[in-house]
Image (spheres, rainbow, N blue to C red):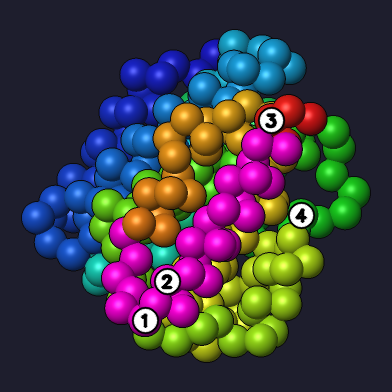
Amino acid sequence: MLKESKIMDVFNKYVKKFDMNKGNVKAVYFHSLKMMDLCKNIASNLGIFSDEEIIICGFIGLFCDVGMFGNKNRLCHFNSSIDYSKKSVEIIFDKDKLIRDITDDTRYDDIIKVAIYCHNKNGLPNGLNNKLLHFCKVVRDAHTIENFRLIVNYQYIDMHIDNFPSDIVYNTFKQYNVISNKIGNNDADNVLEVLSYIFGVNYHYCFVLLKEEESVNKLITSLKISNKALLKFFNQIGAVLNMYIDRKIVG
């Protein structure tokens, strides 16, 4: 059985390669710790995972963005030519083989690879078995919740909004669909993309967490908007999302 102490030892040893006071290192470090806690919390709440599988969920959360370390100030995937989730998988299994420093047990290798690779993609591949789907959904929901904290605390996208979202982005949002990171053209599009992640949340408990943490309100109030019409627009977006969350909680 995997030991959490060993997982943390290997993670911290890897992070020591980078200067904690430069670039995005400190932010990604604490983001990774938060992801681990969220994944374990969500997995435990579902009641479908064994104790060992909950540890695996924590491992996936901790290492899913390990490929982000040292990439200047990048904390997001907007307009990036690099597939950071793919890079994370390569670090874990090929380049640095971090997984083998933790365990020689290969039973969970495929689960870890698929869950990490898919955690920031639009949709999931067909043909995944039910348990693997849950591993993927746990880390994706955790990533959605954590993205709201990141954007408010680190403002990794420009929060000065002076234009409305593009038509293609807004129309996608109005259909209650997650917005692809490939179609945004401006900062308003990027904000709406993050907000749209809520439409991809899978579990009731995660909607409860979003409501408890006031994730939508914190993001909306952190926007810097001087135009009254634009401010009203984003306040209305926030109200729609809060009602959506409430409906999902009530069922």
Which residue lies most toward the right here? Answer: 127
Kind of residue at badge 3: Ile
Horizontal relation, residue 128 to residue 246: left or right:
right
Circle 2 sits on which residue?
231
Q: Which numbered disc covers residue 227? A: 1
**What crowding class fits label 4: few (fewer than 14 Cα within 10 Å), some (14-19), or many (20 or more)?**
some
- Say whether disc 2 or disc 4 marks the residue closer to the N-terminus: 4
Q: Which of the two marks, 2 or 4, is nearer to us in this view? A: 2
Q: Which structural element holds mark 3? A: helix
Q: Residue at x 65, y 45 (%)?
A: 243
Numbered badge on residue 249: 3
User: Would you say residue 109 is visible in this rendering?
Assistant: no
Marks 1/3 in contact by CB < 8 Å: the verdict is no
Classify mark 2: helix, strand or loop: helix
Residue at image point 39% right, 77% down: 228
- Of the residues shown, which amino acid type is indicated by label 2? Leu
- Expressed as whole percent of the image width and height from the top left, the position of residue 209 reads 52, 31
Report the span colored magenta: 222-247
Specify which label sits upstream in the sequence, 4 or 1.
Answer: 4
Residue 121 in the image, given as x and y percentages of width and height: 64, 61
- The answer to whether residue 32 is above or below residue 44 is below
Q: Is residue 76 above or below residue 227?
A: above
Magenta span: chief secondary structure: helix
Of callouts 1 and 3, the N-terminal one: 1
